[in-house]
């Protein structure tokens, strides 16, 4: 699934986003692109679960 995260602007943000996603699904494959503010995730977690944990981490996400 692809998520758009408007305030992911640097590598540090990307690491925080990855950690948040992997807190829900430790086996998730996460590819971040801070330049386009897109995250591609291969996971068994639901989009709603990921959006909730990202919101809590300060990185609200929308469908990419």
Image (cartoon, rainbow, N blue to C red):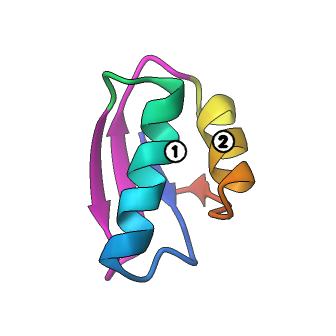
Query: Which residue, given by chain and number where applicable, does mark 2 sit on?
Result: 53
The relative height of residue 23 versus residue 12 in the rendered view (above or below) is: above
Q: Is residue 60 left or right of residue 35?
A: right
Q: Say whether disc 2 or disc 1 marks the residue closer to the N-terminus.
A: 1
Q: Is residue 30 left or right of residue 60?
A: left
Q: x, y (%) of residue 44? A: 44, 17
| Residue drawn at point x = 50 percent, y = 32 percent | 23
Residue 25 is a magenta residue: no
Q: Is residue 29 above or below residue 62?
A: above
Q: Is residue 38 above or below residue 2?
A: below
Q: Quadrant of the N terminus?
A: top left
- In x, y percent, where is residue 20? 52, 44
Q: Are marks 2 and 1 in contact (CB under 8 Å)?
A: yes
Mark-to-mark CA distance, 2 and 1: 6 Å
What is the secondary structure assignment of the residue under circle 2?
helix
State the residue at coordinates (31%, 22%).
27
Looking at the rendering, the stretch of residues picked out in magenta corresponds to 29-45
Quick one: label 2, few (<14), some, or many (20+) residues within 10 Å? some
Residue 26 versus residue 44: which sits nearer the camera?
Answer: 26
Which residue lies under the disc numbered 1?
A: 20
Q: Check disc 1: other Cα within 10 Å, few if <14, some if 14-19, many if 20+.
A: many
Q: What is the x, y in percent for residue 63?
A: 57, 53
Horizontal placement of 29 versus 55: left or right?
A: left
Give the image quarter of residue 36.
bottom left
Q: Is residue 30 magenta?
A: yes
In the figure, residue 43 lies in which quadrant?
top left
In the image, residue 58 sits, relative to residue 55, either above or below, namely below
């Amino acid at each position: 699934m692809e998520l758009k995260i408007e305030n992911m602007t640097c590598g540090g943000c990307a690491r925080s986003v990855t950690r948040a996603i992997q807190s829900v699904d430790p086996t998730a494959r996460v590819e971040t692109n801070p330049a386009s503010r897109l995250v591609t995730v291969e996971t068994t977690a639901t989009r709603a679960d990921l959006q909730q944990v990202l919101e809590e981490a300060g990185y609200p996400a929308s469908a990419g």
